[in-house]
Image (cartoon, rainbow, N blue to C red):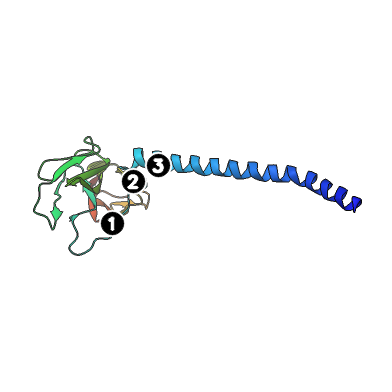
Amino acid sequence: MAAMEIGKEMFELSDSPCKKRSGRCVRNLIKIIVILIITIVILHTFLQNTSIFFRKRILLPFALHLNKQELVLIQGEEYRLYMNAINKRVSYETTNFRVAGVDINGRVFAYRTGKAFIIAKVDGKKYKCRVRVIDLNKKKLTLSVGESYHLNVLGPAVFPRWKSSNPKVASISVFGKVKARSRGRTVIRAKWKGKELKCVVTVR
């Protein structure tokens, strides 16, 4: 019996550091979870009007919503936003007036390339439309035979589709590199999200 008691005491002594270690691990895990939650809340607070947290809403047929949740405009274009299924006062504001402005009637003005959110407020609720403004770095281009030039779609456009109206005069690669091949004139087009940008290329 004495031997059993001694063995039991030794087991308890050897087990106590493991329990302490386990408790410390649990406390550390709780701390990490709390820090992660606080970080997510802070990020969401300061970045809620950016593309990181932008998600399209699933719209019900008669639900209150903006006529557009996403908008792609060419620099200089305008577009009219409005609220569907409502007969109340709506106020509009922009998160980046340098890129896109909006008037009291919801008319959006594309000032320069970049991204912005137009926010409509109704009865204390907010409804967002993400606006992306794009443009081409050149509208007209003159090259000599054999010369090349790189066209870029300015703004948040990714992988636009390029096409030349006359590849024999000037061809264009998938990356926007124009190559002058023979004398004449052609139009280079870049398409992205339903928008078309043009550059008139003259080869001498």
Horizontal side, residue 92 vs residue 193: left or right: left
Q: Amino acid at mark 1?
A: Arg
Nearest the eye: 164 or 22: 22
Q: Which residue is mark 2?
A: 51
* Dot placed on the residue nearer the N-terminal end, 3 or 1: 3
- Residue 12: x and y, percent? 78, 47
Nearest the eye: 68 or 176: 68
Q: Quadrant of residue 112?
A: top left
Nearest the eye: 96 or 48: 48
Residue at the extreme bottom of the image, as rendered: 61
Q: Amino acid at mark 3?
A: Val
Helix, strand or loop at disc 1?
A: loop
Q: Which residue is mark 3?
A: 41
- Residue 153: x and y, percent? 30, 45
- Residue 101: x and y, percent? 18, 39
Query: Could you tell me which residue is drawn at 54 percent across and 40 percent down?
Result: 31
- Cβ–Cβ under 8 Å for marks 3 and 1: no
Question: Which of the image's four quarters has the C terminus?
Answer: top left
Q: Amino acid at mark 2?
A: Ser
How far apart marks 3 and 1 lie (CA) works out to: 21 Å
Whether residue 203 appears in this view of the structure is no
Query: Mark number for residue 142?
Result: none
- Residue 140: x and y, percent? 22, 42
* Dot placed on the residue nearer the N-terminal end, 2 or 1: 2
Query: Could you tell me which residue is drawn at 20 percent across and 54 percent down?
Result: 68
Helix, strand or loop at disc 3?
A: helix
Does residue 41 lie above or below 70 as drawn? Answer: above
Q: Which residue is mark 1?
A: 57
- Residues packed near mark 1 inside 10 Å, few (<14), some (14 to 19) or many (20 plus): few
